[in-house]
Image (cartoon, rainbow, N blue to C red):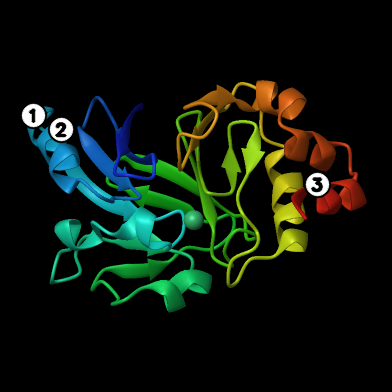
Amino acid sequence: MKARQFKLGPMDNFSYLLWDEDTLHAAVIDPAWQPEKLKSFLAEAKLKLQAVLLTHAHPDHVNALGSFEDPEGKLPVYLNDGDYFMLGSRPAGLRNVSDGEQLQAGSLKISALHTPGHTPGSVCYLAGGFVFTGDTLFIGECGRVDLPGSSPEALYESFVKLAALPDAAVVYPGHSYNGDTSTFGVQKEYNLYLKLARLGRRDDFLKAVG
Ligand SMILES: [Fe+2]
């Protein structure tokens, strides 16, 4: 499985394409800002889009959703229903994705991890050794928890889940803050929040995010 990172827009957002090199089946993650860049890559590589995966519904992650919408709803758009309230309009293909769910997008197999905290419906997607962490986990940082629907306590529980992921798993975050990518092994040591969660230090985690 291959993944490509696209830094797009004025807020250093990342959108991603994920695909199977054999079947060319593909998924787009958090389409925003400059959909033409994603679409031209899809066309040049002859990829066949099978699904849209949303890590959460903040506008800077979904503002190009309309460019990928299939009016008949045949292209699934996955989002945890905890974030439905933030969508301006609901795409025809909108489908809830819940914790632990295994998604099949053509030949792509993707696991979902519900990681609330930044938003109630934040999800990390795991596929092919990559983890798309949205605004839950950045390189050396965690997502903001001072926004409507945020919860520091929920973020702690989410980070406990993330701290159990394999060291070799690649972090693909939702913004280019402090860096573009890393591994969970490195982040478990150098990301204060992930380290505190790994060590079970809940009070210190809550103080640090406060
Ligand atoms: Fe966000």
The circle drawn on residue 41 is 2
Instruction: Give the secondary structure at mark 3.
Output: helix
**Tag count in the figure?**
3
Please say if the residues under marks 2 and 1 sit with CB atoms less than 8 Å apart: yes
Q: Residues within 10 Å of mark 3 (few under 14, many from 20)?
A: few
Mark 3, residue position:
208
The kind of residue on which mark 1 rests is Glu
Percent across and percent down for residue 6 are 30, 33
C-alpha span from label 1 to label 3: 45 Å
Label 3 CB, ligand 1: below 8 Å? no
C-alpha span from label 3 to label 2: 40 Å
The circle drawn on residue 44 is 1
Whichever of callouts 1 and 3 sits on the residue coming sooner in the sequence is 1
Query: Split into 4 quadrants, where in the image is the C terminus?
Result: bottom right
Which residue sits at x=66%, y=28%? 166
The circle drawn on residue 198 is none
Lateral position of residue 96 relative to residue 115, left or right:
left
Q: Is residue 114 above or below residue 175?
A: below
Which residue sits at x=67%, y=27%? 187
